[in-house]
Image (cartoon, grey):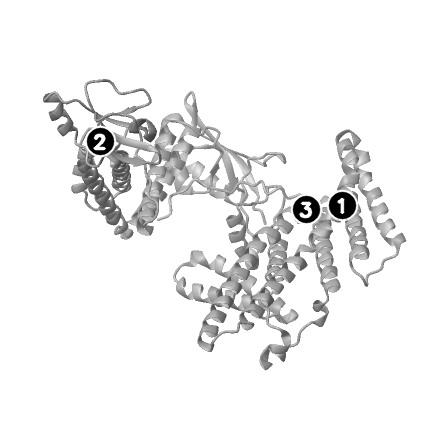
Amino acid sequence: MIVPMLRLTLLCAAHDRVAALAALRALGCVHVGLEVRDGEGIRRAAAEVAAAEQAIRALDAAKKGGAFVFKPEAGSPIASLDAERLLSEARGATAPTTAAEVNRLAALATRLSEEALAATLVARRYAPFGEVNPATVAALAREGIRVTLFKAPAKIADALGPDAYRFRTEAGFAYGAWISDEPLHAGFEALPLPEVSTAVLRARAAEAETAAHAIKALLAGCAALRPALAREVAAAAADRTAAEVAANLRDVGDVAYLRGYIPARAEADLLAKAKTEGWGIVTETPAPDDPNVPVLLEPPRGFRAIGVVFKGLGILPGYSEGDVSIPFYAFFSLFFAMLVGDAGYGALMFAATVAAAIALRGKPAARPALTVFAVFSLSTVLWGVLSGTYFGIDKTALPACLMAIPTVDWLGSNDNMMFLCFLIGATHLSLARVWNAILLAPTLKMVGEIGWLCVTWGMFAVVCNIVVAWFSAPVALMAGLVGGGVALILVPLVADIRHEGISIGMLPLNVISAMGDIISYVRLFAVGLASVKVAENFNAMALGLDLPFVLRVLAVAAILLVGHGLNLAMGALSVLVHAVRLNTLEFSNAKGITWSGQPYAPFCQPQQ
């Protein structure tokens, strides 16, 4: 269910606001309405959260040894250091103990890598000239010998006299030194001398890169610091929340007030606390159209694990939309099984779930996710057993123990499978309409939901008549269901035509869309069949190899491992696309679920 909420207004003495916030935080049941979301304290706390999170990312990046870019902010001391100071800082680097130290080292490593790259690029620019030392050129100038480095098209350089000493020709350009007091000819590009010799540049680049790698190695060895940084993130996030709540406790003369929401069941505890602290409390039922009411979702115990899926998808029903956890869990499990469609794959997933449960047995937080995956895996096994599908192996080649398991031959027909998909779709959508009708009884809107129920089954009959070869329904029945359903839908719309005029105009399109919703469920058959065919083709490819025995064994193992692994991954992707869509779009549109809820987040003490 969705836990009922009350809208709260809390009043306290303005001079007692700090103590009131501490007491409210200790109570831990008030979801504060954040009308003010900016301020110096909020920005400072948010910066601390960002710094702690960046420190964790820096440790992870250093451990993986991949791309490592953590640029310092413009005002940071690291940003203004020159190459020599950077190297000096790197030589004195020690293992970090806080997020700030981690970020400083990460920024230092990034700046060193940038310096190394910059020095390397400059050295490469002068590579055609060999070794270039500005001190040597300056010494020649003191002796009256003027030297200018140049770049010019090779054809022009060929026509010059002995004053143009050529070093190298690359890509149609000549690189050389103009040894003369005369100005360079037109078409020549004079190149300025580097600040230091190219030998020094290369040495500086190598030293900077070595120092950067050393700092990354230092960070990579700080894995033990990560839990402390995670606690630092949690503490900083709690401080940010506290700053946001403090900004929303506003003063009006000698009184400070705060608005928010509490679960109705927590009202007694809040009132008791208010008497102790001397607060003024006003609670009221939220308005039906209040978009800010938070959602505390508590499905029945056996279905509570589906919250993991909701959280992973980032969806939550609105406060006034109802808890759809039970049908979502049940139909999502069915869709998962049909889309993956293979008992072998289901058994592998269940084995992986069991292994994960053993590895995480000391972590209760992982239990809901493991429960969900166990249910999905076992559903897939059951569907695969009923259809006789095991890794795409031909049924005649299955081991005797598997062939002895009874299957449902009816599922082997494409027409039957399409009929089943349409039936599942009609049932799924009808559940939403019946649910709505019960909630809307005894208003006229209930009649409209019954009308949509008739349209749903009328369109089911139409679709099956068109697609399923053996299905035949009387035209009168189909016309009666659709026509009668439309008439019932019009009853509440016409009764409130001032507000529902647009809905009447859109009704023909919505009726056609109802047929599209039924057809949409055929994806369960199409994707599941594709998965089986892919598995069969990989099996045929592996068994059809004509190679020496040893090579054949290795090749078969590689093809089966890669092929079935890819097929299983595609099955997981199809679940994310199709099973989620059928629940969050087709069913949710019929039920009126917009998934616009914001989670209940009480102001409370940070968890240790």
Mark nearest the camera among 3 and 2 is 2
User: How far across and how far down the image is residue 507, in percent?
Assistant: 78, 39
Specify the label residue 449 is tagged with: 1
How busy is the neighbourhood of tag 2: few (under 14 within 10 Å), some, or many (20 plus)?
some
Query: Front-most of 551 and 580?
Result: 551
The dot on residue 591 is 3
The residue type indicated by label 1 comes to: Glu
Residue 235 appears anywhere in the view = no
Which residue type carries mark 3? Lys
The mark that comes first in sequence, 1 or 3, is 1
Which is in the foreground here, disc 2 or disc 1?
2
**Upstream in sequence: badge 3 or badge 2:** 2
Q: Amino acid at mark 2?
A: Leu
Chain-order first, disc 2 or disc 1? 2
Horizontal and vertical percent position of residue 48? 33, 36
Locate residue 179 relative to residue 601 in the image: left or right.
Answer: left
Q: Nearer the viewer, residue 367 or 353?
A: 353
Circle 1 sits in a helix, a strand or a loop, which is it?
Answer: helix
Quickly name the residue at label 2. 81
Q: Is residue 162 visible?
A: yes
Query: Badge 3: how crowded within 10 Å, few (<14), some, or many (20+)?
Result: many
Judged from the image, the secondary structure of the residue bearing numbered disc 2 is loop
Residue ID at (70%, 67%): 411
Residue that sits furthest to the top in the current view: 182
Mark 2 to mark 1: distance in Å? 70 Å
In this image, 544 relative to 279: left or right? Answer: right
User: Distance of mark 1 from mark 3, alpha carbons?
Assistant: 10 Å
Please tell me which residue lies in front, 240 or 103.
103
Percent x, y of residue 565: 50, 62
Residue 583 horizontal/vertical position (percent):
63, 50
Picture mark count: 3
Residue at x-position 56% and y-position 60%: 302
